[in-house]
Image (cartoon, rainbow, N blue to C red):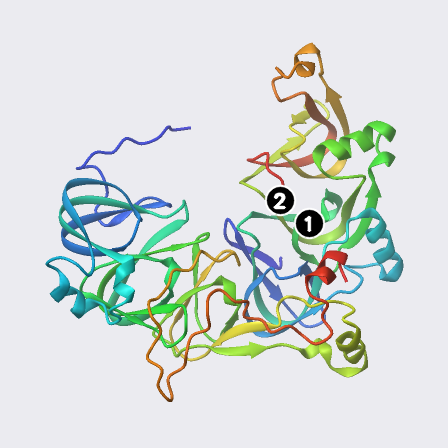
């Protein structure tokens, strides 16, 4: 077994992973990062909170939600910066004149050449443009192509494809036995009644577990206007409770 | 071979019409094609008697039946996954470690006391298996979960294997196991090595160990 590898400023990888859980950014200029995700740096780097200071002009070009900007900091200067998040798997992705929508809690950092916008799907952020960004996931990320249906909790993001729609499987609640199940709650739910369905061309990013990473706020919701979908408050379970389901007690009894 | 590992924590299964899989409820991450997930009331095979047996034995993990045609990806709780191919032999594993398995495998429940009497029951308590464990027998594949990576240790008559009961995951083949306890005055005064219990496996087969002493 080899022990821990010792790095210095020159041997640290440039814009690449140090190990599955840490990413090294070769900083020349500016990067945006989520608050608290920098673990170490070499060189001369200043960290500015957004919203106060000389950078406000820059911010307006990259952040399209003024109130959301409070969760981000600007790293400015020269050097190498290590990013990590609670030992989750970290990966960098390159966008070339593309778009990618990612769960808000998973995005760690991005280059200012990308612009960050709130997705119309609550809890998600969209990156548009050309550049590199770093995202974390609970377990390695798997890339799949549509058409596919995914567990809502396993979804990390998607690129270049139309936004997903909801898909419900209640097949087993039909018919006579299904009726009995629906009325009595006997048999329980499979936990897979609700998925996100992706169609069209693009790529879907999945994490290897259905355990979500903690969500971060995507900033103030969109203005209350007619025709603008409003986000749901907080981390509410997405699956509607089926009729006849006895709640969590039922699962405990294994019914 | 219906299971394919995508990475250390995720497995992909092919579902073909007429062949079903069992999987832990809620462990599906994504699927392609026309696949249905039905909660299995009886929690596996063997009909109502099998269900009652599992309920009494506390080996009734909520399972669902996966049928149709397509590919399904499974993963659960960020645990490491390992695919074990069975060809006629028996796998002894705790029901809650089962991520998914072929519907062709015969599922059973075994009383720990039937292997070594009272010491078998004590062993069940120490390994966290309880008084009963699940057996899977036949030809097919099983996806098993563990906290931390999997280590596969072959057991031969010349080379018995000793494992930490807390790191024990599953075993297969014709294996006898014996729990040895080395409790002396150090353990009594709380200055023990923490390795007082050891599980010794002998015979021919394989034991699977996880790289952690944490339970699932």
Q: Identify the image quadrant of residue B110.
A: top right
Q: Is residue B26 above or below residue B92?
A: below
Q: Left or right: B121 with respect to B71?
A: right
Quadrant showing the C terminus of chain A? bottom right
**Residue B78 placement (x, y as % from top left):** 53, 50
Q: Left or right: A233 with respect to A64?
A: right
Q: CA distance from mark 2 to mark 1?
A: 8 Å
**Residue B207 placement (x, y as % from top left):** 67, 35
Of helix, strand and loop, which one carries label 1? helix
The residue depicted at 71 percent of the width and 37 percent of the height is B128
The residue depicted at 40 percent of the width and 75 percent of the height is A121
Q: Nearer the viewer, residue A233 or B144?
A: A233
Q: Identify the image quadrant of residue A92.
A: bottom left
Residue B175 visible (yes or no): no
Quadrant showing the N terminus of chain A? top left
**Residue A252 placement (x, y as % from top left):** 73, 56
Q: Nearer the viewer, residue B50 or A116?
A: A116
Q: Identify the image quadrant of residue A4.
A: top left
The residue depicted at 81 percent of the width and 39 percent of the height is B131
Are both tags, 2 and 1, on one chain?
A: yes
The residue under label 1 is B96
Residue A210 visible (yes or no): yes
Local packing at callout 1 (Cα closer than 10 Å; few below 14, some 14-19, many 20+) is some
Q: Earlier in the sequence, mark 2 or mark 1?
A: 1
Q: Are marks 2 and 1 in contact (CB under 8 Å)?
A: yes
Q: Is residue A196 above or below residue A43?
A: below
Of helix, strand and loop, which one carries label 2? loop
**Residue A14 placement (x, y as % from top left):** 21, 46
Find residue B51 and name its label.
Answer: none
The residue under label 2 is B216
């Amino acid at each position: 077994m080899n022990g821990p590898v010792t790095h210095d400023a020159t041997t640290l990888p440039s814009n690449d992973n140090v190990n599955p859980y840490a990413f090294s950014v070769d900083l020349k200029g500016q990067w945006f990062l989520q608050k608290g995700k920098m673990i170490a740096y070499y060189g001369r780097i200043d960290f500015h909170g957004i919203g106060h200071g000389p950078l406000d002009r820059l911010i307006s070009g990259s952040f399209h939600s003024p109130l959301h900007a409070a969760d981000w900091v600007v790293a400015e200067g020269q050097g190498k910066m290590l990013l990590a998040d609670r030992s989750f798997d970290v990966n960098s992705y390159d966008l070339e004149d593309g778009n990618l929508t990612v769960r808000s809690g998973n995005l760690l950092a991005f280059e200012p050449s990308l612009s960050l916008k709130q997705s119309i799907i609550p809890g998600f952020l969209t990156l548009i443009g050309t550049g590199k960004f770093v995202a974390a996931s609970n377990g390695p990320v798997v890339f799949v192509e549509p058409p596919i249906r995914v567990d809502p909790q396993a979804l990390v993001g998607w690129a270049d494809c139309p936004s997903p729609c909801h898909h419900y499987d209640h097949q087993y609640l039909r018919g006579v036995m299904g009726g009995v199940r629906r009325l009595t709650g006997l048999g329980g739910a499979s936990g897979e009644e609700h998925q996100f369905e992706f169609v069209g061309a693009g790529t879907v990013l999945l994490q290897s577990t259905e355990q979500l990473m903690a969500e971060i706020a995507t900033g103030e919701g969109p203005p209350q206007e007619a025709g603008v979908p409003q986000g749901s408050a907080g981390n509410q379970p997405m699956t509607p409770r089926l009729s006849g389901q006895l709640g969590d007690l039922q699962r405990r009894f294994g019914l | 071979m219906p299971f394919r590992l995508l990475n250390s924590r995720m497995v992909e299964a092919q579902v073909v019409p007429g062949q079903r899989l069992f999987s832990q409820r809620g462990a599906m991450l994504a699927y392609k094609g026309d696949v249905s997930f039905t909660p299995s009331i009886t929690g596996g095979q063997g009909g109502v008697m099998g269900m009652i047996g599992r309920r009494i034995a506390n080996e009734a993990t909520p399972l669902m039946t996966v049928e149709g045609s397509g590919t399904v990806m499974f993963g659960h709780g960020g645990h490491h996954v390992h695919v074990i191919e069975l060809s006629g032999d028996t796998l002894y594993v705790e029901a809650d470690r089962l991520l998914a398995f072929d519907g062709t495998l015969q599922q059973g429940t075994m009383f720990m006391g039937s292997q070594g009497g009272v010491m078998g029951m004590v062993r069940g308590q120490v390994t966290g298996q309880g008084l009963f464990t699940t057996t899977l027998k036949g030809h097919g594949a099983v996806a098993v979960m563990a906290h931390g990576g999997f280590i596969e240790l072959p057991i031969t008559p010349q080379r018995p294997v000793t494992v930490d009961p807390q790191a024990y995951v599953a075993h297969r083949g014709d294996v006898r196991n014996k729990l040895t306890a080395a409790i002396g005055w150090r353990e009594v005064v709380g200055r023990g090595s923490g390795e007082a219990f050891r599980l010794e496996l002998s015979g021919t087969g394989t034991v699977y160990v996880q790289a952690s002493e944490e339970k699932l």
